Image (spheres, rainbow, N blue to C red):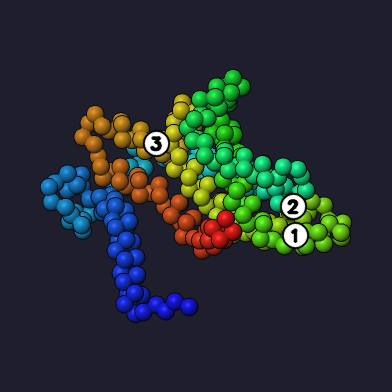
Amino acid sequence: MTTVTPFKKFFGHAVLIVASLLVLLPVYWMAVSAVEPNADILSSTIHWIPTHFQPGNFSKALHAQPFGRFFLNSFVMSTMIVVLQVITSSLAAYALVFIPMKRKRSWFFSILLAMMVPMQATFIPVYLILSSVHLINTYLGLVLPFAGSAFGIFLLRQGFVSIPKDLVHAARIDGASEWKILRSIVLPNAKPMILTLILLNFVFHYNDLFWPLISTSTTNMRVVPVALSYFLSQEAGQTLQWNLLMAADLVTIIPVLALFLAGQRYMIKGIMGSAIKG
């Protein structure tokens, strides 16, 4: 067993603290800029502590555009994608692990290959298909391209292989259906992987800009990242109100931050479990 000396322990903690401060520095600057006048942000002197406190920036920023509608659209889109991906990925991973079939390794290799295809490379054919069935600028148009996920299948498959197959065989002998085995035995034992998939997908699609930008054309279908980009472009011709933009940014990250803080323990457990088995 390797012994960790007090110096190594202190050095490791010091590196982690410095790295954490560097990561949090832009967030702190954003929070400070959100509550101070625009002139203070543009001045040559950096204000690490606000000298003129303006909490009204949040109200002005949220009233500049219909952020309530944008939050609703982002929440609905991200939630629908997460639900669909958990369903499709768990079914595919269950088949790969517990259903006897030929060329199982080839199917798994195909999924790994699919993970290497850049998502942007598929957007043009996907857009043309959805446009031909009039689903552009709808919730279905935002959600359907992400209903299945190669990464989700891979992640859940890594979790499912740790479940003893004898447990599944015993359930089959007792007369349990495949659906009941998946719902009552497999999914409860793969909870860290499922929560990891939920967290990663929700955060990714909540922050996604590219597909919502090209697949929506009206204000009532816009999502938060698109709204922030519009906020920036609309103000660019005038004196850009950085303080209002920072206030809007700060409010939009609160749901993602709360979700991450609530589920970080499960996410670390799920990623570590996947890495060990991978």
Q: Residue at x 43, y 36 (%)?
A: 209
For the residues labelled 2 and 3, the Cα–Cα distance comes to: 44 Å
Percent position (x, y) of residue 154? 60, 48
Q: Which residue lies most toward the top here?
A: 132
Name the residue that disc number 1 marks.
Answer: 165
Q: Is mark 3 in CB contact (under 8 Å) with mark 1?
A: no
Residue at 36% across, 75% down: 9
Which mark, by number, is residue 98? 2
Secondary-structure class at tag 1: helix
Q: Give the residue type that dot 1 points to.
A: Lys
Residue ID at (76%, 45%) = 101
The residue identified by callout 3 is 227
Asked whether disc 2 touches disc 3, contact meaning CB atoms under 8 Å apart, the reply is: no
First in residue order: circle 1 vs circle 2: 2
Q: Position of residue 114 (x, y in %)?
A: 57, 38
Label drawn at residue 133: none
Image depth: mark 3 or mark 1 in front:
1
